Every structure is written in C-alpha cells, then in structure tokens.
Image (spheres, coloured by chain):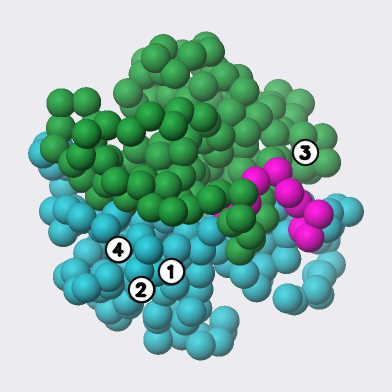
Chain colours: A green, B cyan
Amino acid sequence: MDETIRPGEIAVAFDPSSACDAQLVFIGHIRTPWTERGQCPRQGDRNDGPECTIIVDPMWHRALTGIERWPELQLLYWMNFARRDLVIQVATGKEPQGTFAMRSPVRPNPIASSIVALRRVEEGKLIVTGLDCLDMTPLLDIKAHFGEAKLPAP
Amino acid sequence: MDETIRPGEIAVAFDPSSACDAQLVFIGHIRTPWTERGQCPRQGDRNDGPECTIIVDPMWHRALTGIERWPELQLLYWMNFARRDLVIQVATGKEPQGTFAMRSPVRPNPIASSIVALRRVEEGKLIVTGLDCLDMTPLLDIKAHFGEAKLPAP
C-alpha cells in the first residue's frame, strides 16, 4: 500500500483493519493486461479496449445463469492496494478535492464500479471490454446493467 | 433476514459471518420515506422521486469538499437485510435466473449502486432524488458520476 501523501492532501485517523461494520467475500478475480498501476489506462474503453477475463469461483458458477442476454454488465471490484484514510486528495495537476467528489481508488471503502461490454461467456468466465484495473483484482459483484440497450426481463 | 426460499431457487453453503476477504466501514446512513421493504419503489426516480437525505459521519465530512459541482452522484450502500447465499432466484412472476443476471438485493455481497440527482448540500448532508432503499440503510461510498452532464475536472 502506498502511504505517501502529497502537499494539500489530508488523512483522517482511520485504521481499515478495525473496519468491521460488514464483511466482503471475493467471488472471483479479474485478469487484465496490466500488472503495474502505471500501466492501467485512465478509464476503460468498452469499444476499443482489450479483452479482459472475469474468473468466477466455482461455488458461484450457477449465479451466471442467463447472463449472456445482457450486452452490458456492471462490475464491482476491490482495489486492494488503495489506502483508505484520505479525505482530501490531489490528482496530478489538479486542485485538492474531497474524496467523495472524485472517483479515485483511494476512499474509505475502495470499491470500484465499472460498466463493461460482455463479449462472450465461457465456463465460469466472462470475456469483457471496458476495464482499467490491475491484473488479479478481486471481484465483488456482477450485476445486470440496464443501460441504453435495455431489455425486457424474461 | 428473510430465510424463505421459493420453488426453483437454489442456495449454496455460504456463511456470511465467515466472509472475511475484506472489511467495510459504514460512512453514514440514508434517510428515506420507506420503513418497510414492501413500501420501497421498484426503482428510484431522479426526476420525480421524493427527496432523501444522505447523512455522512463527521469523520468523513471533509471528503464532501467540492461535491456540489456534480449534478449526479453514484451511491453505494449496504442492503443489510438481504440473504447472501442464493445463486438462482425467482422474482415474482418470472422464470428462475442467476443472481449475477439480476439486480436483486440478494447476492454474495449485497452492495447496491444507484445514480442519484444531487439537489443540495447541507452541513454533512446531501439531499438527493432517485433512491429506492429502506430508511436507515448504511452508506458505503459516494462517487462523482460522469454521466450525460459531464463536467471538466477543476
């Protein structure tokens, strides 16, 4: 975890190891081409980004039933390298901003949310485009996304 | 927690009290007009829905700095009454579906994601429209939402 702080940034006294209001289970992980943070794109590209693979743990495979009918999905995943105690952050070349006015990975609960395009489904795996996260990122949730391409429920 | 199961639904052996891959902190709570689950609308309405109040815990107040410039926000919150072990679910009048092909509150990690319209900001509070959750729902995150009304970063 990166513990450096930039001029203008403000941290609060928050120890994530004592955060115990609720517990998460990792339901799988995400394979992407990016193995260092500096390689990750600033934002995912659903049209032209590289294919990434969502690998779902076997106990949850049946929960994928019917997922192929959604052109787009919402993914929630855990940004496990992000510190959690900054309330004011300074993005490169920007003024200080409040954490909740940003989408930085650094936040009290480092949960990322991305809308991805579903390209195909294999046994326990989803091939998607539109991600920008590190390889091996832990997966928290997959949800149907009711976007422009809204479909009637079956 | 509701432990009933409908014909066609499938649960896996998952004990959420043993889910310890990561821990969440509640950063506040949400006040809505709905005190029973049957009262909640099926989906929030950003245009015509009632005003709801996001109450942020004092230790995170500074993280709201600058939030007033976003017309829309993404909220993540914790559906603390939902069971977490269903992989196949049967919504009323529907065929059985996989949990990840739905947006049901029942899922391994019951994190809800909603896009809301920000009406105004008060000290440590956000007044928003577009929610459909129970009164006193625990809050996990507030993020800038880059929607149609995309603004340049400051």
Q: Which mark is residue B28?
A: 1
Q: Residue at x 58, y 28 (%)?
A: A137
Placement of A7 over or under B86, stated as above or below: above
Three-letter code for the amino acid on which mark 3 is drawn: His
Distance (Cα) linking label 2 and label 4: 10 Å
Question: Which of pointers 2 and 4 lies earlier in the amino acid sequence?
Answer: 2
Measured along the vertical axis of the image, is residue B91 above or below residue A69? below
Q: Residues within 10 Å of mark 2 (few under 14, many from 20)?
A: many
Residue highlighted by disc 2: B55
Report how far apart the C-alphas of labels 1 and 2 lie in the structure.
5 Å
Tell me whether circle 1 and circle 2 mark residues in contact (CB < 8 Å). yes
* Eye-nearest disc, 4 or 1: 4
The residue to which callout 4 is attached is B61
Which tag, 1 or 2, sits closer to the chain's start?
Answer: 1
Which structural element holds mark 1? strand
Q: Which residue is mark 3?
A: A61
Report in which chain the residue with disc 4 lies: B
